[in-house]
Amino acid sequence: MKNIYLVGFMGTGKTSVGKELAKKLEWPFADLDDLIELKERRLIRDIFAKNGEAYFRKVEGTVLKQVAKEKKFVVSCGGGIVIDPANITLMKKSGTIICLTASPEIIFKRTSRYAHRPLLNVPNPKKHIEVLLKMRAPYYAKAHKVIDTSKFSVKQAAGKILKTINNKK
Ligand code: S3P
């Protein structure tokens, strides 16, 4: 069995659902954003502020390559991982891609509680979420399966993913 990659916009529940899924499967859990911060020994917002988004994307791709060598890992990815087609190819080769979605309203509610996401530290984050969601929709659609978490608890969303994975076997 290969890895399970959780992709999707910020605030769709990738980390909490990923941890629950890993617990259910008894697989290790990896959060790409955490691995990036460990590698760089600084916070993502500091990477963006000092070196910009393009540099962040390069590190993100490098860290993904390392994780893709593993098997049976549940991997929660940053919301922008799908923008680079090479990342999609690699994730498809080394696992199953599950995309979590939620409505812009729910994403705004969930993300406005925290200030660590540089892309949402803008004057009108709600509008920016809508714009980014539209721009990224074709990339997220490349996942093997799309699951809307708007109406699900973390446990329910993890259960849905498990069902999908079991049906694919
Ligand atoms: C980003 C999402 C963030 C993080 C970085 C960029 C994005 O991860 O990788 O701030 O481009 O959508 P989360 O989706 O885990 O918040």
Image (spheres, rainbow, N blue to C red):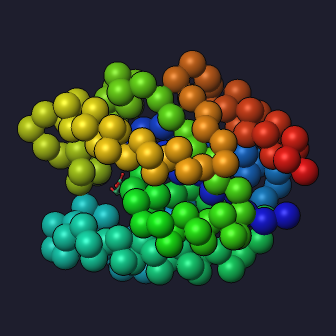
Q: Residue at x 31, y 29 (%)?
A: 108
Q: Is residue 35 left or right of residue 3?
A: left
Question: Among all residues in the image, which is located at the extreme top?
Answer: 151
Q: What x and y, as percent, mark residue 151?
A: 57, 19
Residue 123 quadrant: top left
Q: Residue at x 62, y 25 (%)?
A: 153
Residue 126 quadrant: top left
Whether residue 18 is visible: no
Residue 62, compared with residue 135, is above or below; it is: below
Residue 122, compared with residue 70, is above or below; it is: above
Residue 141, compared with residue 3, is above or below; it is: above
Q: What x and y, as percent, mark residue 98?
A: 63, 47
Q: How many marks?
A: 0
Residue 145, compared with residue 102, is above or below; it is: below
Q: Residue at x 60, y 72 (%)?
A: 90
Quadrant the N terminus occupies: bottom right
Q: Residue at x 31, y 64 (%)?
A: 44
Whether residue 54 is visible: yes
